[in-house]
Image: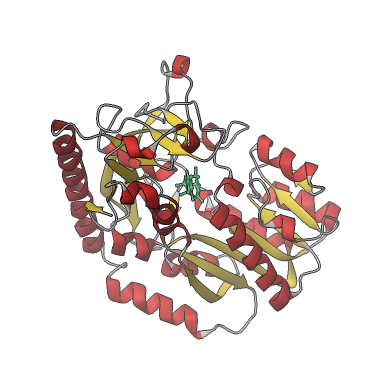
Amino acid sequence: MRKEFLDLGRQPIANKFLKEDEYEGEFFYDLKVIFDEDTKLVSLKDFVKPELMFNEDYAYNTSMSYPMVKHFELTANMLKEEFNPKTVLEIGSNDGPFIKNFDTETSICVEPCENFAKKTTDMGYRSYISFWDTDVSHGIKEIHGEMDLVYAANCICHIQNLDECFAAVNNILSEDGVFVFEDPSLLRMLERGSYDQIYDEHAHIFSVTALNNILINNGLTIFRVDNLSVHGGSNRIYVARNRPVEFSVAENKQREYDFGINNFQTYEIFAERVRKSKKDLVELLTKLKGEGKRVVSIGATSKSTTVFNYCDIGESLIECITDTTPDKQGLLAPGSHIPVVDRESVNLNDYDYAFLGAWNFKDVIANKEREFVENGGKFITHVPEVMVFS
Ligand code: DWN
C-alpha cells in the first residue's frame, strides 16, 4: 500500500532554466512523496514525463562540478582493478566523466539527453540517445554482446519503472558481470533533513532495504554496499547474480532498520521537520531583508529549485544565484525566476550572506570563498537545520 507523507507544493522542472520570455507557460506539477509499505520504496506520488526533464536542453553538466570528475576517475580505476571488465556499459553517461576512463572500443553509453550523447560520441564512444529500457538493452546486446560491467551514477533513481530497468540490466549482464550504481541515500536524507533531494528527476530515493526487495524479484542480488559522501550522502550498490553477499549489505539494512525506515511514522516525523525547516528559512531571510542585508545563493542546483519553490523564495529575498555552469548562466532559476550569474561576474563582498544551494559542496565552497568570510560574509544553510555560519 502506498501512503503519502510529504507535500512540497507546486514545482517546476528542476533543471529547466529559463530565458525572460519563457515565463509564460512554465510547466508546474504537484510534488508529493509516498512510502510503499510492501517494498519500503520512497517515491514521488506522480511522476513527471521523462521527456520534459531529460532532453537536449538538460543543464546539469557533471564535468562542471570538479570534485565529481575526480570522484568518477577514482571510481573507474577501482572498478577496473577489482573486476577487470572487458566490456562496459554506462547508463546515463551525461558528459562522460566516468566513461572517459575506459577504452572507446569496448565501452558503450546510453544517454537520453542529445547534448551529452553528442559529447561522448565526439570523445569516440558509441553513444545511444535513449532512455534505458528492455528494447534498448536487447538492441545493444545484439550488436555489442553482453556487458561485464554495467554502471550508472545518479541515474537509476531517475528511472520510474524499476522492474523494467532491472530486467533490462539482467538481460545484458554477462554471466559473472557486475552492475554497480550510486544514488543519494534515503537514510542520509532522513538523518540530515535534506528534503531538497526530492525533485522531479528523483523518481525514487533509495534505501538498501527497498532496492534489495526489488532487485531480488528481478533475479539480481546486492552483494556489497559502499557509503559515499558525494551528493550529500550516497550509496554505491554492487549487484550480481551469484556473488557471495558481503557483510556491508546486512550492516546497511540493519542501520536503516534501526533508524525506522520501515515505519511510516518515521516519514511523518521527517515531514514535520521539513515544514519547520521552511518556516525557519523564510523567517531568517525575511528578517535579514528587514535589516537591509543582501543575500546571494551559490550553486543553481536541482535541490535549490525544490527549496526556493517550496519556501516561496524569490528575487526579493535572494538577489541572484552564482553557478559555474555556462549553460545555466544568464538564465532564470526554475519557478523562483532568480537570475543565475557567472561567479566571476559577482563581487561576493557586496553581499552579507550566501545561501548554499550546493550545500553538498560546503567545504569546497567555503574554502574557495575564504575572502568573503574574511570580509565579514556569512553562509546560510538549511542542512541539517537552518543556520548561519562563517
Ligand atoms: O542526480 C542528479 C545530481 C547528480 O546532479 C541530477 N538529477 C541533477 C544534479 O543535481 P544538483 O543540481 O542538485 O547537483 P549538484 O552537483 O549539487 O550541483 C552543483 C551545482 O553547483 C552545479 O551547477 C555546479 C555548481 N557549483 C558552483 O557553482 N560552484 C559547484 C561547485 C562545486 C562550486 O564551487
- Residue 163 in view, yes or no: no
- List x then y, in percent, for residue 138: 75, 52
Front residue (pair 285, 58): 285
Task: Give the quadrant of the N terminus.
Answer: bottom left
- List x then y, in percent, for residue 187: 36, 65
Compared across the picture, whether 361 is left or right of 123 comes to left
Compared across the picture, whether 94 is left or right of 246 comes to right
- Work out whether 157 lies above or below 289: below
Compared across the picture, whether 63 is left or right of 276 comes to right
Task: Give the colouring mode of the picture.
Answer: secondary structure
Q: At 53% from the left edge and 67% from the top edge, which residue is drawn? A: 236
- List x then y, in percent, for residue 106: 83, 59
Front residue (pair 255, 163): 255
Compared across the picture, whether 12 is left or right of 381 comes to right
- List x then y, in percent, for residue 107: 78, 57
- Residue 340 in view, yes or no: yes
Indicate the quadrant where residue 241 lies.
Answer: bottom right
- Work out whether 23 lies above or below 10: above
Q: At 38% from the left edge and 49% from the top edge, which residue is drawn? A: 371
**Number of marks in the rendered image:** 0
Task: Give the quadrant of the C terminus.
Answer: bottom left
